[in-house]
């Protein structure tokens, strides 16, 4: 008998790694020059989850980091604010108390980021405390150990429990695509996360494994497009881990625009999580 997860996976088209690579190359070669503009770069600034996720982060550093986002507001009226500030959960309160820039959310990693190797009770408790401190968005990591053992039930239960704990806050599920590697695994992890209530699917933690790739982005966007076509529901996508240059960010834009279309060109559904991209985007925009 097909289990419910296999049944869900079978509703979405499979792709080989070679097909994905070919499609990505085609999209970038046909669209990069067209989208490599100041307007696109300004839009990309508005998608940034500006991230500080260092073991050595201090309260002082997080206050200064948030202060930079506050200071940016209005400096150049043509430059938008970033979408969110993303920190470890123990700094949510600090960001919440310091942040004055309009429309910028407070996001945090949770659920025993980045390995997700712990007890579900610990993961839920961490998420609950971050929500209590005012997090608007919670980024958790898929239980890769369970997922890679084909124990989809455990992986799904953990996402669902944390989804419930998030209440009205947005839940992003990090697939850690650099560890999953194959298009088929990324496809399955994307579908599983969406069925468990993820508001966003996110590529990577930016820690132990390779970060975002255009190939992983393509697979995730293809699943999101089919999910919308099947169920009428738009869910978001976040690329993260190692995205530093304006050029790389524009390439991710090409994938979103060409695979998902206009409806996703808002930071409600499109994010780039990055610690060092903002400055590079700003300096690449003509004065
Ligand atoms: O989600 C955010 C990532 O950890 C950021 O990675 P990055 O420091 O390579 O930009």
Image (cartoon, helix red, strand yellow):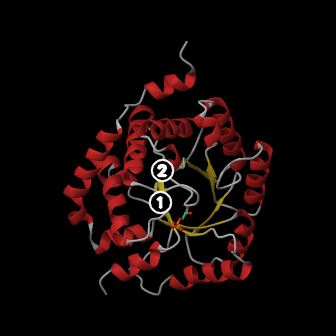
Asked if residue 268 can be seen in this view, the reply is: no
| Label 2 to label 1: alpha-carbon separation | 8 Å
- The residue carrying mark 2 has its beta carbon less than 8 Å from ligand 1: no
Tell me the quarter of the image containing the C terminus. bottom left
Residue at x 40% of width, y 67% of height: 44
For the residue labelled by badge 2, is the local secondary structure a helix, a strand or a loop? strand
Query: In the rendered image, which residue does mark 1 sit on?
Result: 271
Q: Position of residue 71 (x, y in %)?
A: 55, 86
Q: Which residue corresponds to mark 2?
A: 236
Q: Is residue 235 above or below residue 135?
A: above
* Front residue of 134 and 88: 88
Along the viewing direction, whichever of 267 and 87 lies nearer the viewer: 87
Q: At which x and y percent is residue 262?
A: 33, 53
Quadrant hosting ligand 1: bottom right
Query: Which one is earlier in the sequence, the residue at label 2 or at label 1?
Result: 2
Q: Tell me where residue 224 appears, x and y as whole percent.
A: 43, 42
Position of residue 158 in the picture relative to residue 283 (left or right): right
Instruction: Indicate the position of residue 106 as horizontal and vertical percent values.
Output: 63, 66
Q: Determine the image quadrant of residue 97.
A: bottom right
Please say if 25 is above or below 224.
below
Residue at the (50%, 61%) spot, across then down = 241
Q: Are marks 2 and 1 in contact (CB under 8 Å)?
A: yes
Q: What quarter of the picture does the N terminus occupy? A: top right
Of residues 24 and 281, the one drawn nearer to the viewer in this rendering: 24
- Crowd band around label 1 with a 10 angstrom C-alpha radius: few (<14), some (14–19), many (20+): many
How packed is label 2: few (under 14 Cα within 10 Å), some, or many (20 or more)?
Answer: many
Q: Is residue 267 visible?
A: yes
Residue located 42% across and 85% down the image: 76
Q: Secondary structure at mark 1?
A: strand
**Residue furthest to the top:** 1
């Amino acid at each position: 008998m097909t289990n419910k997860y296999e049944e869900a996976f079978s509703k979405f088209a499979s792709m080989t790694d070679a097909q994905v690579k070919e499609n990505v190359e085609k999209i970038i070669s046909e669209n990069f020059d067209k989208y490599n503009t100041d307007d696109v770069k300004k839009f990309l600034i508005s998608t940034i989850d500006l991230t500080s996720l260092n073991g050595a982060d201090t309260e002082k550093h997080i206050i200064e980091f948030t202060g930079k986002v506050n200071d940016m507001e209005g400096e150049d009226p043509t430059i938008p604010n970033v979408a969110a500030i993303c920190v470890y959960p123990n700094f949510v309160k600090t960001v919440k108390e310091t942040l004055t820039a309009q429309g910028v959310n407070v996001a945090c990693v949770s659920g025993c980021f980045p390995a997700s190797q712990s007890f579900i009770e610990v993961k839920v408790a961490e998420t609950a405390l971050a929500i209590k401190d005012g997090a608007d968005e919670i980024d958790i990591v898929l239980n890769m150990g369970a997922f890679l053992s084909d124990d989809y039930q455990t992986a799904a239960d953990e996402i669902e429990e944390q989804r419930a704990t998030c209440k009205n806050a947005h839940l992003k599920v990090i697939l850690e695509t650099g560890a999953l590697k194959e298009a088929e695994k990324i496809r399955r992890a994307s579908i599983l996360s969406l069925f468990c209530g993820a508001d966003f699917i996110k590529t990577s933690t930016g820690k132990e494994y390779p970060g975002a790739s255009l190939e992983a982005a393509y697979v995730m966007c293809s699943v999101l497009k089919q999910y919308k076509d099947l169920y009428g529901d738009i869910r978001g996508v976040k690329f993260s881990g190692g995205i530093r240059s304006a050029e790389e960010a524009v390439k991710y834009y090409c994938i979103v625009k060409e695979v998902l279309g206009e409806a996703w060109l808002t930071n409600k559904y499109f994010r780039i999580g990055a610690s060092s991209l903002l400055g590079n985007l700003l300096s690449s925009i003509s004065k």
